[in-house]
Structure formats: structure tokens, C-alpha cells
Amino acid sequence: MLRAWAQPMRPIRLPEPSAGLSGVPDIFESGFASAIKRAVVIGNGFAGAENQCFGLIRALGLSGRHSLYRVTRPRGGINKWLHWLPVSVHKRVDYLIKRMYGYSQFQFIAPETSGLSQVLEADARQIAKMAHQTFEREGPLLVVASGRDTISVASSIKQLAPENVFVIQIQHPRSHLNRFDLVIAPRHDYYPLTPHAQEQIPWFFRRWITPREPPDRHVVLTVGALHQADSAALRNAASIWNDELATLPKPLLVVNVGGPTSNCPYGVDLAKQLTAMLQGVLWSCGSIRISFSRRTPEKVAKIIAKEFSDNPKVYIWDGEDPNPHMGHLAWADAFLITADSVSMLSEACSTGKPVYVIGAERCTWKFAYFQKSLRERGVVRPFTGKEDISENWSYPPLNDLAEAASRVNQALTERGWRIRT
């Protein structure tokens, strides 16, 4: 841990929670059966997708009153090459392979579950049946799903119990939007409709590229991803991490390193670029805290750690609990984030603090469009290694979470339902 000395603390600038977004008090409810008091989250086991659901649930005032179900795929061995299949087809193929060849030939090794065994498998029929049978006693059921694998389950719940549920699909389902009550998708999901994207798509592929139509009235567009880092969560994190982070020399630069993706590829080259550029701004930093994600390649993390492990200004999180991520969001004076992570960028850009990005030029397709939209809004700047981190610049913070929650409440009101706080 860094040794610190007392300096004046820069005020933490957090957006105030918007009024009227977390539901309607009981006194305004028009009837017991119209009050939504519970929710179901349909997840896919990936934090980036599930955190969007949890963030929306928090913003709607239903935190602590939701159940988590997951759509799970067969894992291990040959299954890593079968993720392009629909979930139901993947499970059938997995069953047939096991019946024909047995388990050992394809090395079906059970992966680490990280608590997955405590989460119920998402069964559309069971969830729809529960919503129908408990409607008179508990009121409507809010269903929030995110991720490609959850689409068929969420749409089936809507089809089986249309009068008892309100189904929200986060991330664009690509087709059949009428199967959901509301779709929440980032604007860059509609990149294929832009003139620039059309130039990149060969004409014989265009009929398969989705979406093919502009968003209609029940599609909510966001700039980035939804998340759980709202003002209340950050104020709580500021309190929890006060003893460890409040006394660090200022300014505090938080560096978040993600991992390469097919649309934002990088390797040791970016790690070397990052370390060289960080050396260029060390003089203007009081403290630097570096965190790696689960997707960060080991060789990338080792290069960065080797460069800064002996520097007294720099602390590198070792990956052990407790995770300082929320504390970093609350206490950082500025952020440096790799361009691959829409989630980390969305969280940082909701704080109103300076956000620098490295590797944006490596992004392609809709992710390059996302980076461009952030720059045009003035919420990020490309990292050059020549910055003065003590320079304080600001912008209107991204407010996707509050705006999405407001649209959900509006859609519920149109249906005659309200969220009970």
C-alpha cells in the first residue's frame, strides 16, 4: 500500500439522483393488481450483461426484490467452438455427442462455476406459470434480460403470459422487437444503418446484417451500457473506501485495463504503449492505481506490473477481494481506460470526471462508432502520454441509467401499471 501525506481533498463530484425514477409510492397506486413489487432477471453468466439488468433494477427501486435466473450453455472441451449455435440447438448437439462418444473423448471438464450452481436455470414455462399463478396476489412481474442467449427465454415468457408480465430486453435482439414490451439498446447497435456502415457491407450480406430498420417507439436508445454505478452506489463506495483512498496523494489516476476482443484486438504492443505513455504523465500524478479485468491476458498484465511494481506512486490491485472498482469510481480524479470495454467506459463517463482512452484506433465496426460518439460528446479524450493529470476538465455526465428508468416507468404507466416502492 502507498504511503500517503495529507493534502487538500478535491470534492467528489457525483450526479444527484433524478427524481421520480424509482417508482411510485403506494399512495398513488390505482389498484393492488397494477403494482409491480418484484422482478426477475434473466442472465447469461457474464458480468457485463447481468450488471446492466441489476443497474436498471436498482434505478427502478426494485433492488433486493428480484430473483436471478440464468441461461446456461454446455461448457468445456468442444463446446467452446459451439457458442455460435442457438442455446437450445447447442444443448441438443451436446447431448447427442455425449450419447454417441461419451464424456472422455472430448474432455468435458467441468469449469469453475463461480456460484452458478446456486442460480436457477431459466425456464420460460416455469417463470410464466409463476407469473400467472401469483398475479392476483403479487401483481405483475417485471422481467429484465440481457445478452443474446436470453432472447428466446425472455420472448417466450412474454408469449406465454402476456397479461401478467412486462418484459424488457437489454441489448438489441436483432429481430422480432414486438416480442418484448421494451428494448433498451446502445445507439451503436444501430451502426449498420449508417451510410458509412452500409459502405462496409457487401451488398449480398446486407439482408443478414441487423438491425435493418430504425428504432420504433418501444426502443430506448442509450449512449453506452447500463451499470450499477449510480450516485447512491458511489456515495456508499466513497464511505466504504474512505480510509484507504481518501488520504492518497492527489490527483489520483485510476487505470482500468480490459482485454482484447474481435473488434478491439491488441496484445503486448498495447501494454508497451501504455507503460511508455504512463511514464510520461507520472510527474503530474499524486497516485496511480491499476486494475486488470478477468479478460486481461497474463502477458499484458505482467508487462505493466513489471514496469511499475517498484514505483511508490503506483498500486496494482492483485485481483483478490475486496474489489476496489467502485471505490476507484468514487475517489478517482481521472481515469485511463482501454477502449475494448464499453462497460468500464460507460461507468467512468457517468461520473463527470476526466476520462482518457487508449487503443480506440484499434476498434472496428460499431465499437469504433461508439468511441467516435464519446469523443464527439466531449466525455473522453485520447490518451497521448503528454497530459497534465491535474488538469480538471468536465462534461455533462452520461445519464443513460436514469433516462432508461424514466422510459420504463412511462411505458408501465401507459399500460396502467406502476412500480411499488
Image (cartoon, helix red, strand yellow):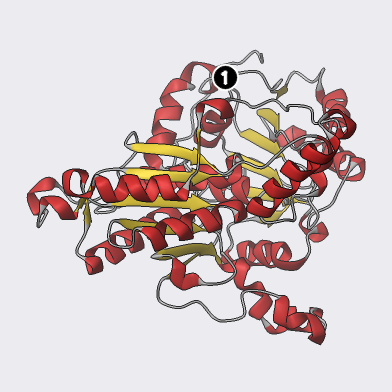
Q: Quadrant of the C terminus?
A: top left
SS at badge 1: loop
The extreme front residue here reads 100
Residue located 70% across and 75% down the image: 209
Q: How many marks?
A: 1
Q: Residues within 10 Å of mark 1 (few under 14, many from 20)?
A: few
The percent coordinates of residue 109 (x first, y second) are: 79, 27
Question: Which of the 4 image quarters holds residue 207?
Answer: bottom right
Residue position for label 1? 322
Asked whether 260 or 254 is in front, the reply is: 260
Q: Is residue 104 above or below residue 179?
A: above
- Amino acid type of the residue tagged 1 in the rendering: Pro
Left or right of 211 in this view: 16? left
Question: Which of the 4 image quarters holds residue 67?
Answer: top left
Asked whether 210 or 52 is in front, the reply is: 210
Q: Is residue 229 above or below residue 172?
A: above
Residue located 61% across and 67% down the image: 189
The percent coordinates of residue 253 (x first, y second) are: 65, 35
The percent coordinates of residue 343 (x first, y second) are: 60, 48
Left or right of 133 in this view: 257? right
Residue located 11% across and 53% down the image: 29
In this rendering, does residue 164 appear at all?
yes
Asked whether 123 or 307 is in front, the reply is: 123
Residue located 23% across and 64% down the image: 413
Asked whether 222 or 119 is in front, the reply is: 119
In this rendering, does residue 22 appear at all?
no
The percent coordinates of residue 267 (x first, y second) are: 88, 43
Q: Quadrant of the N terminus?
A: top right
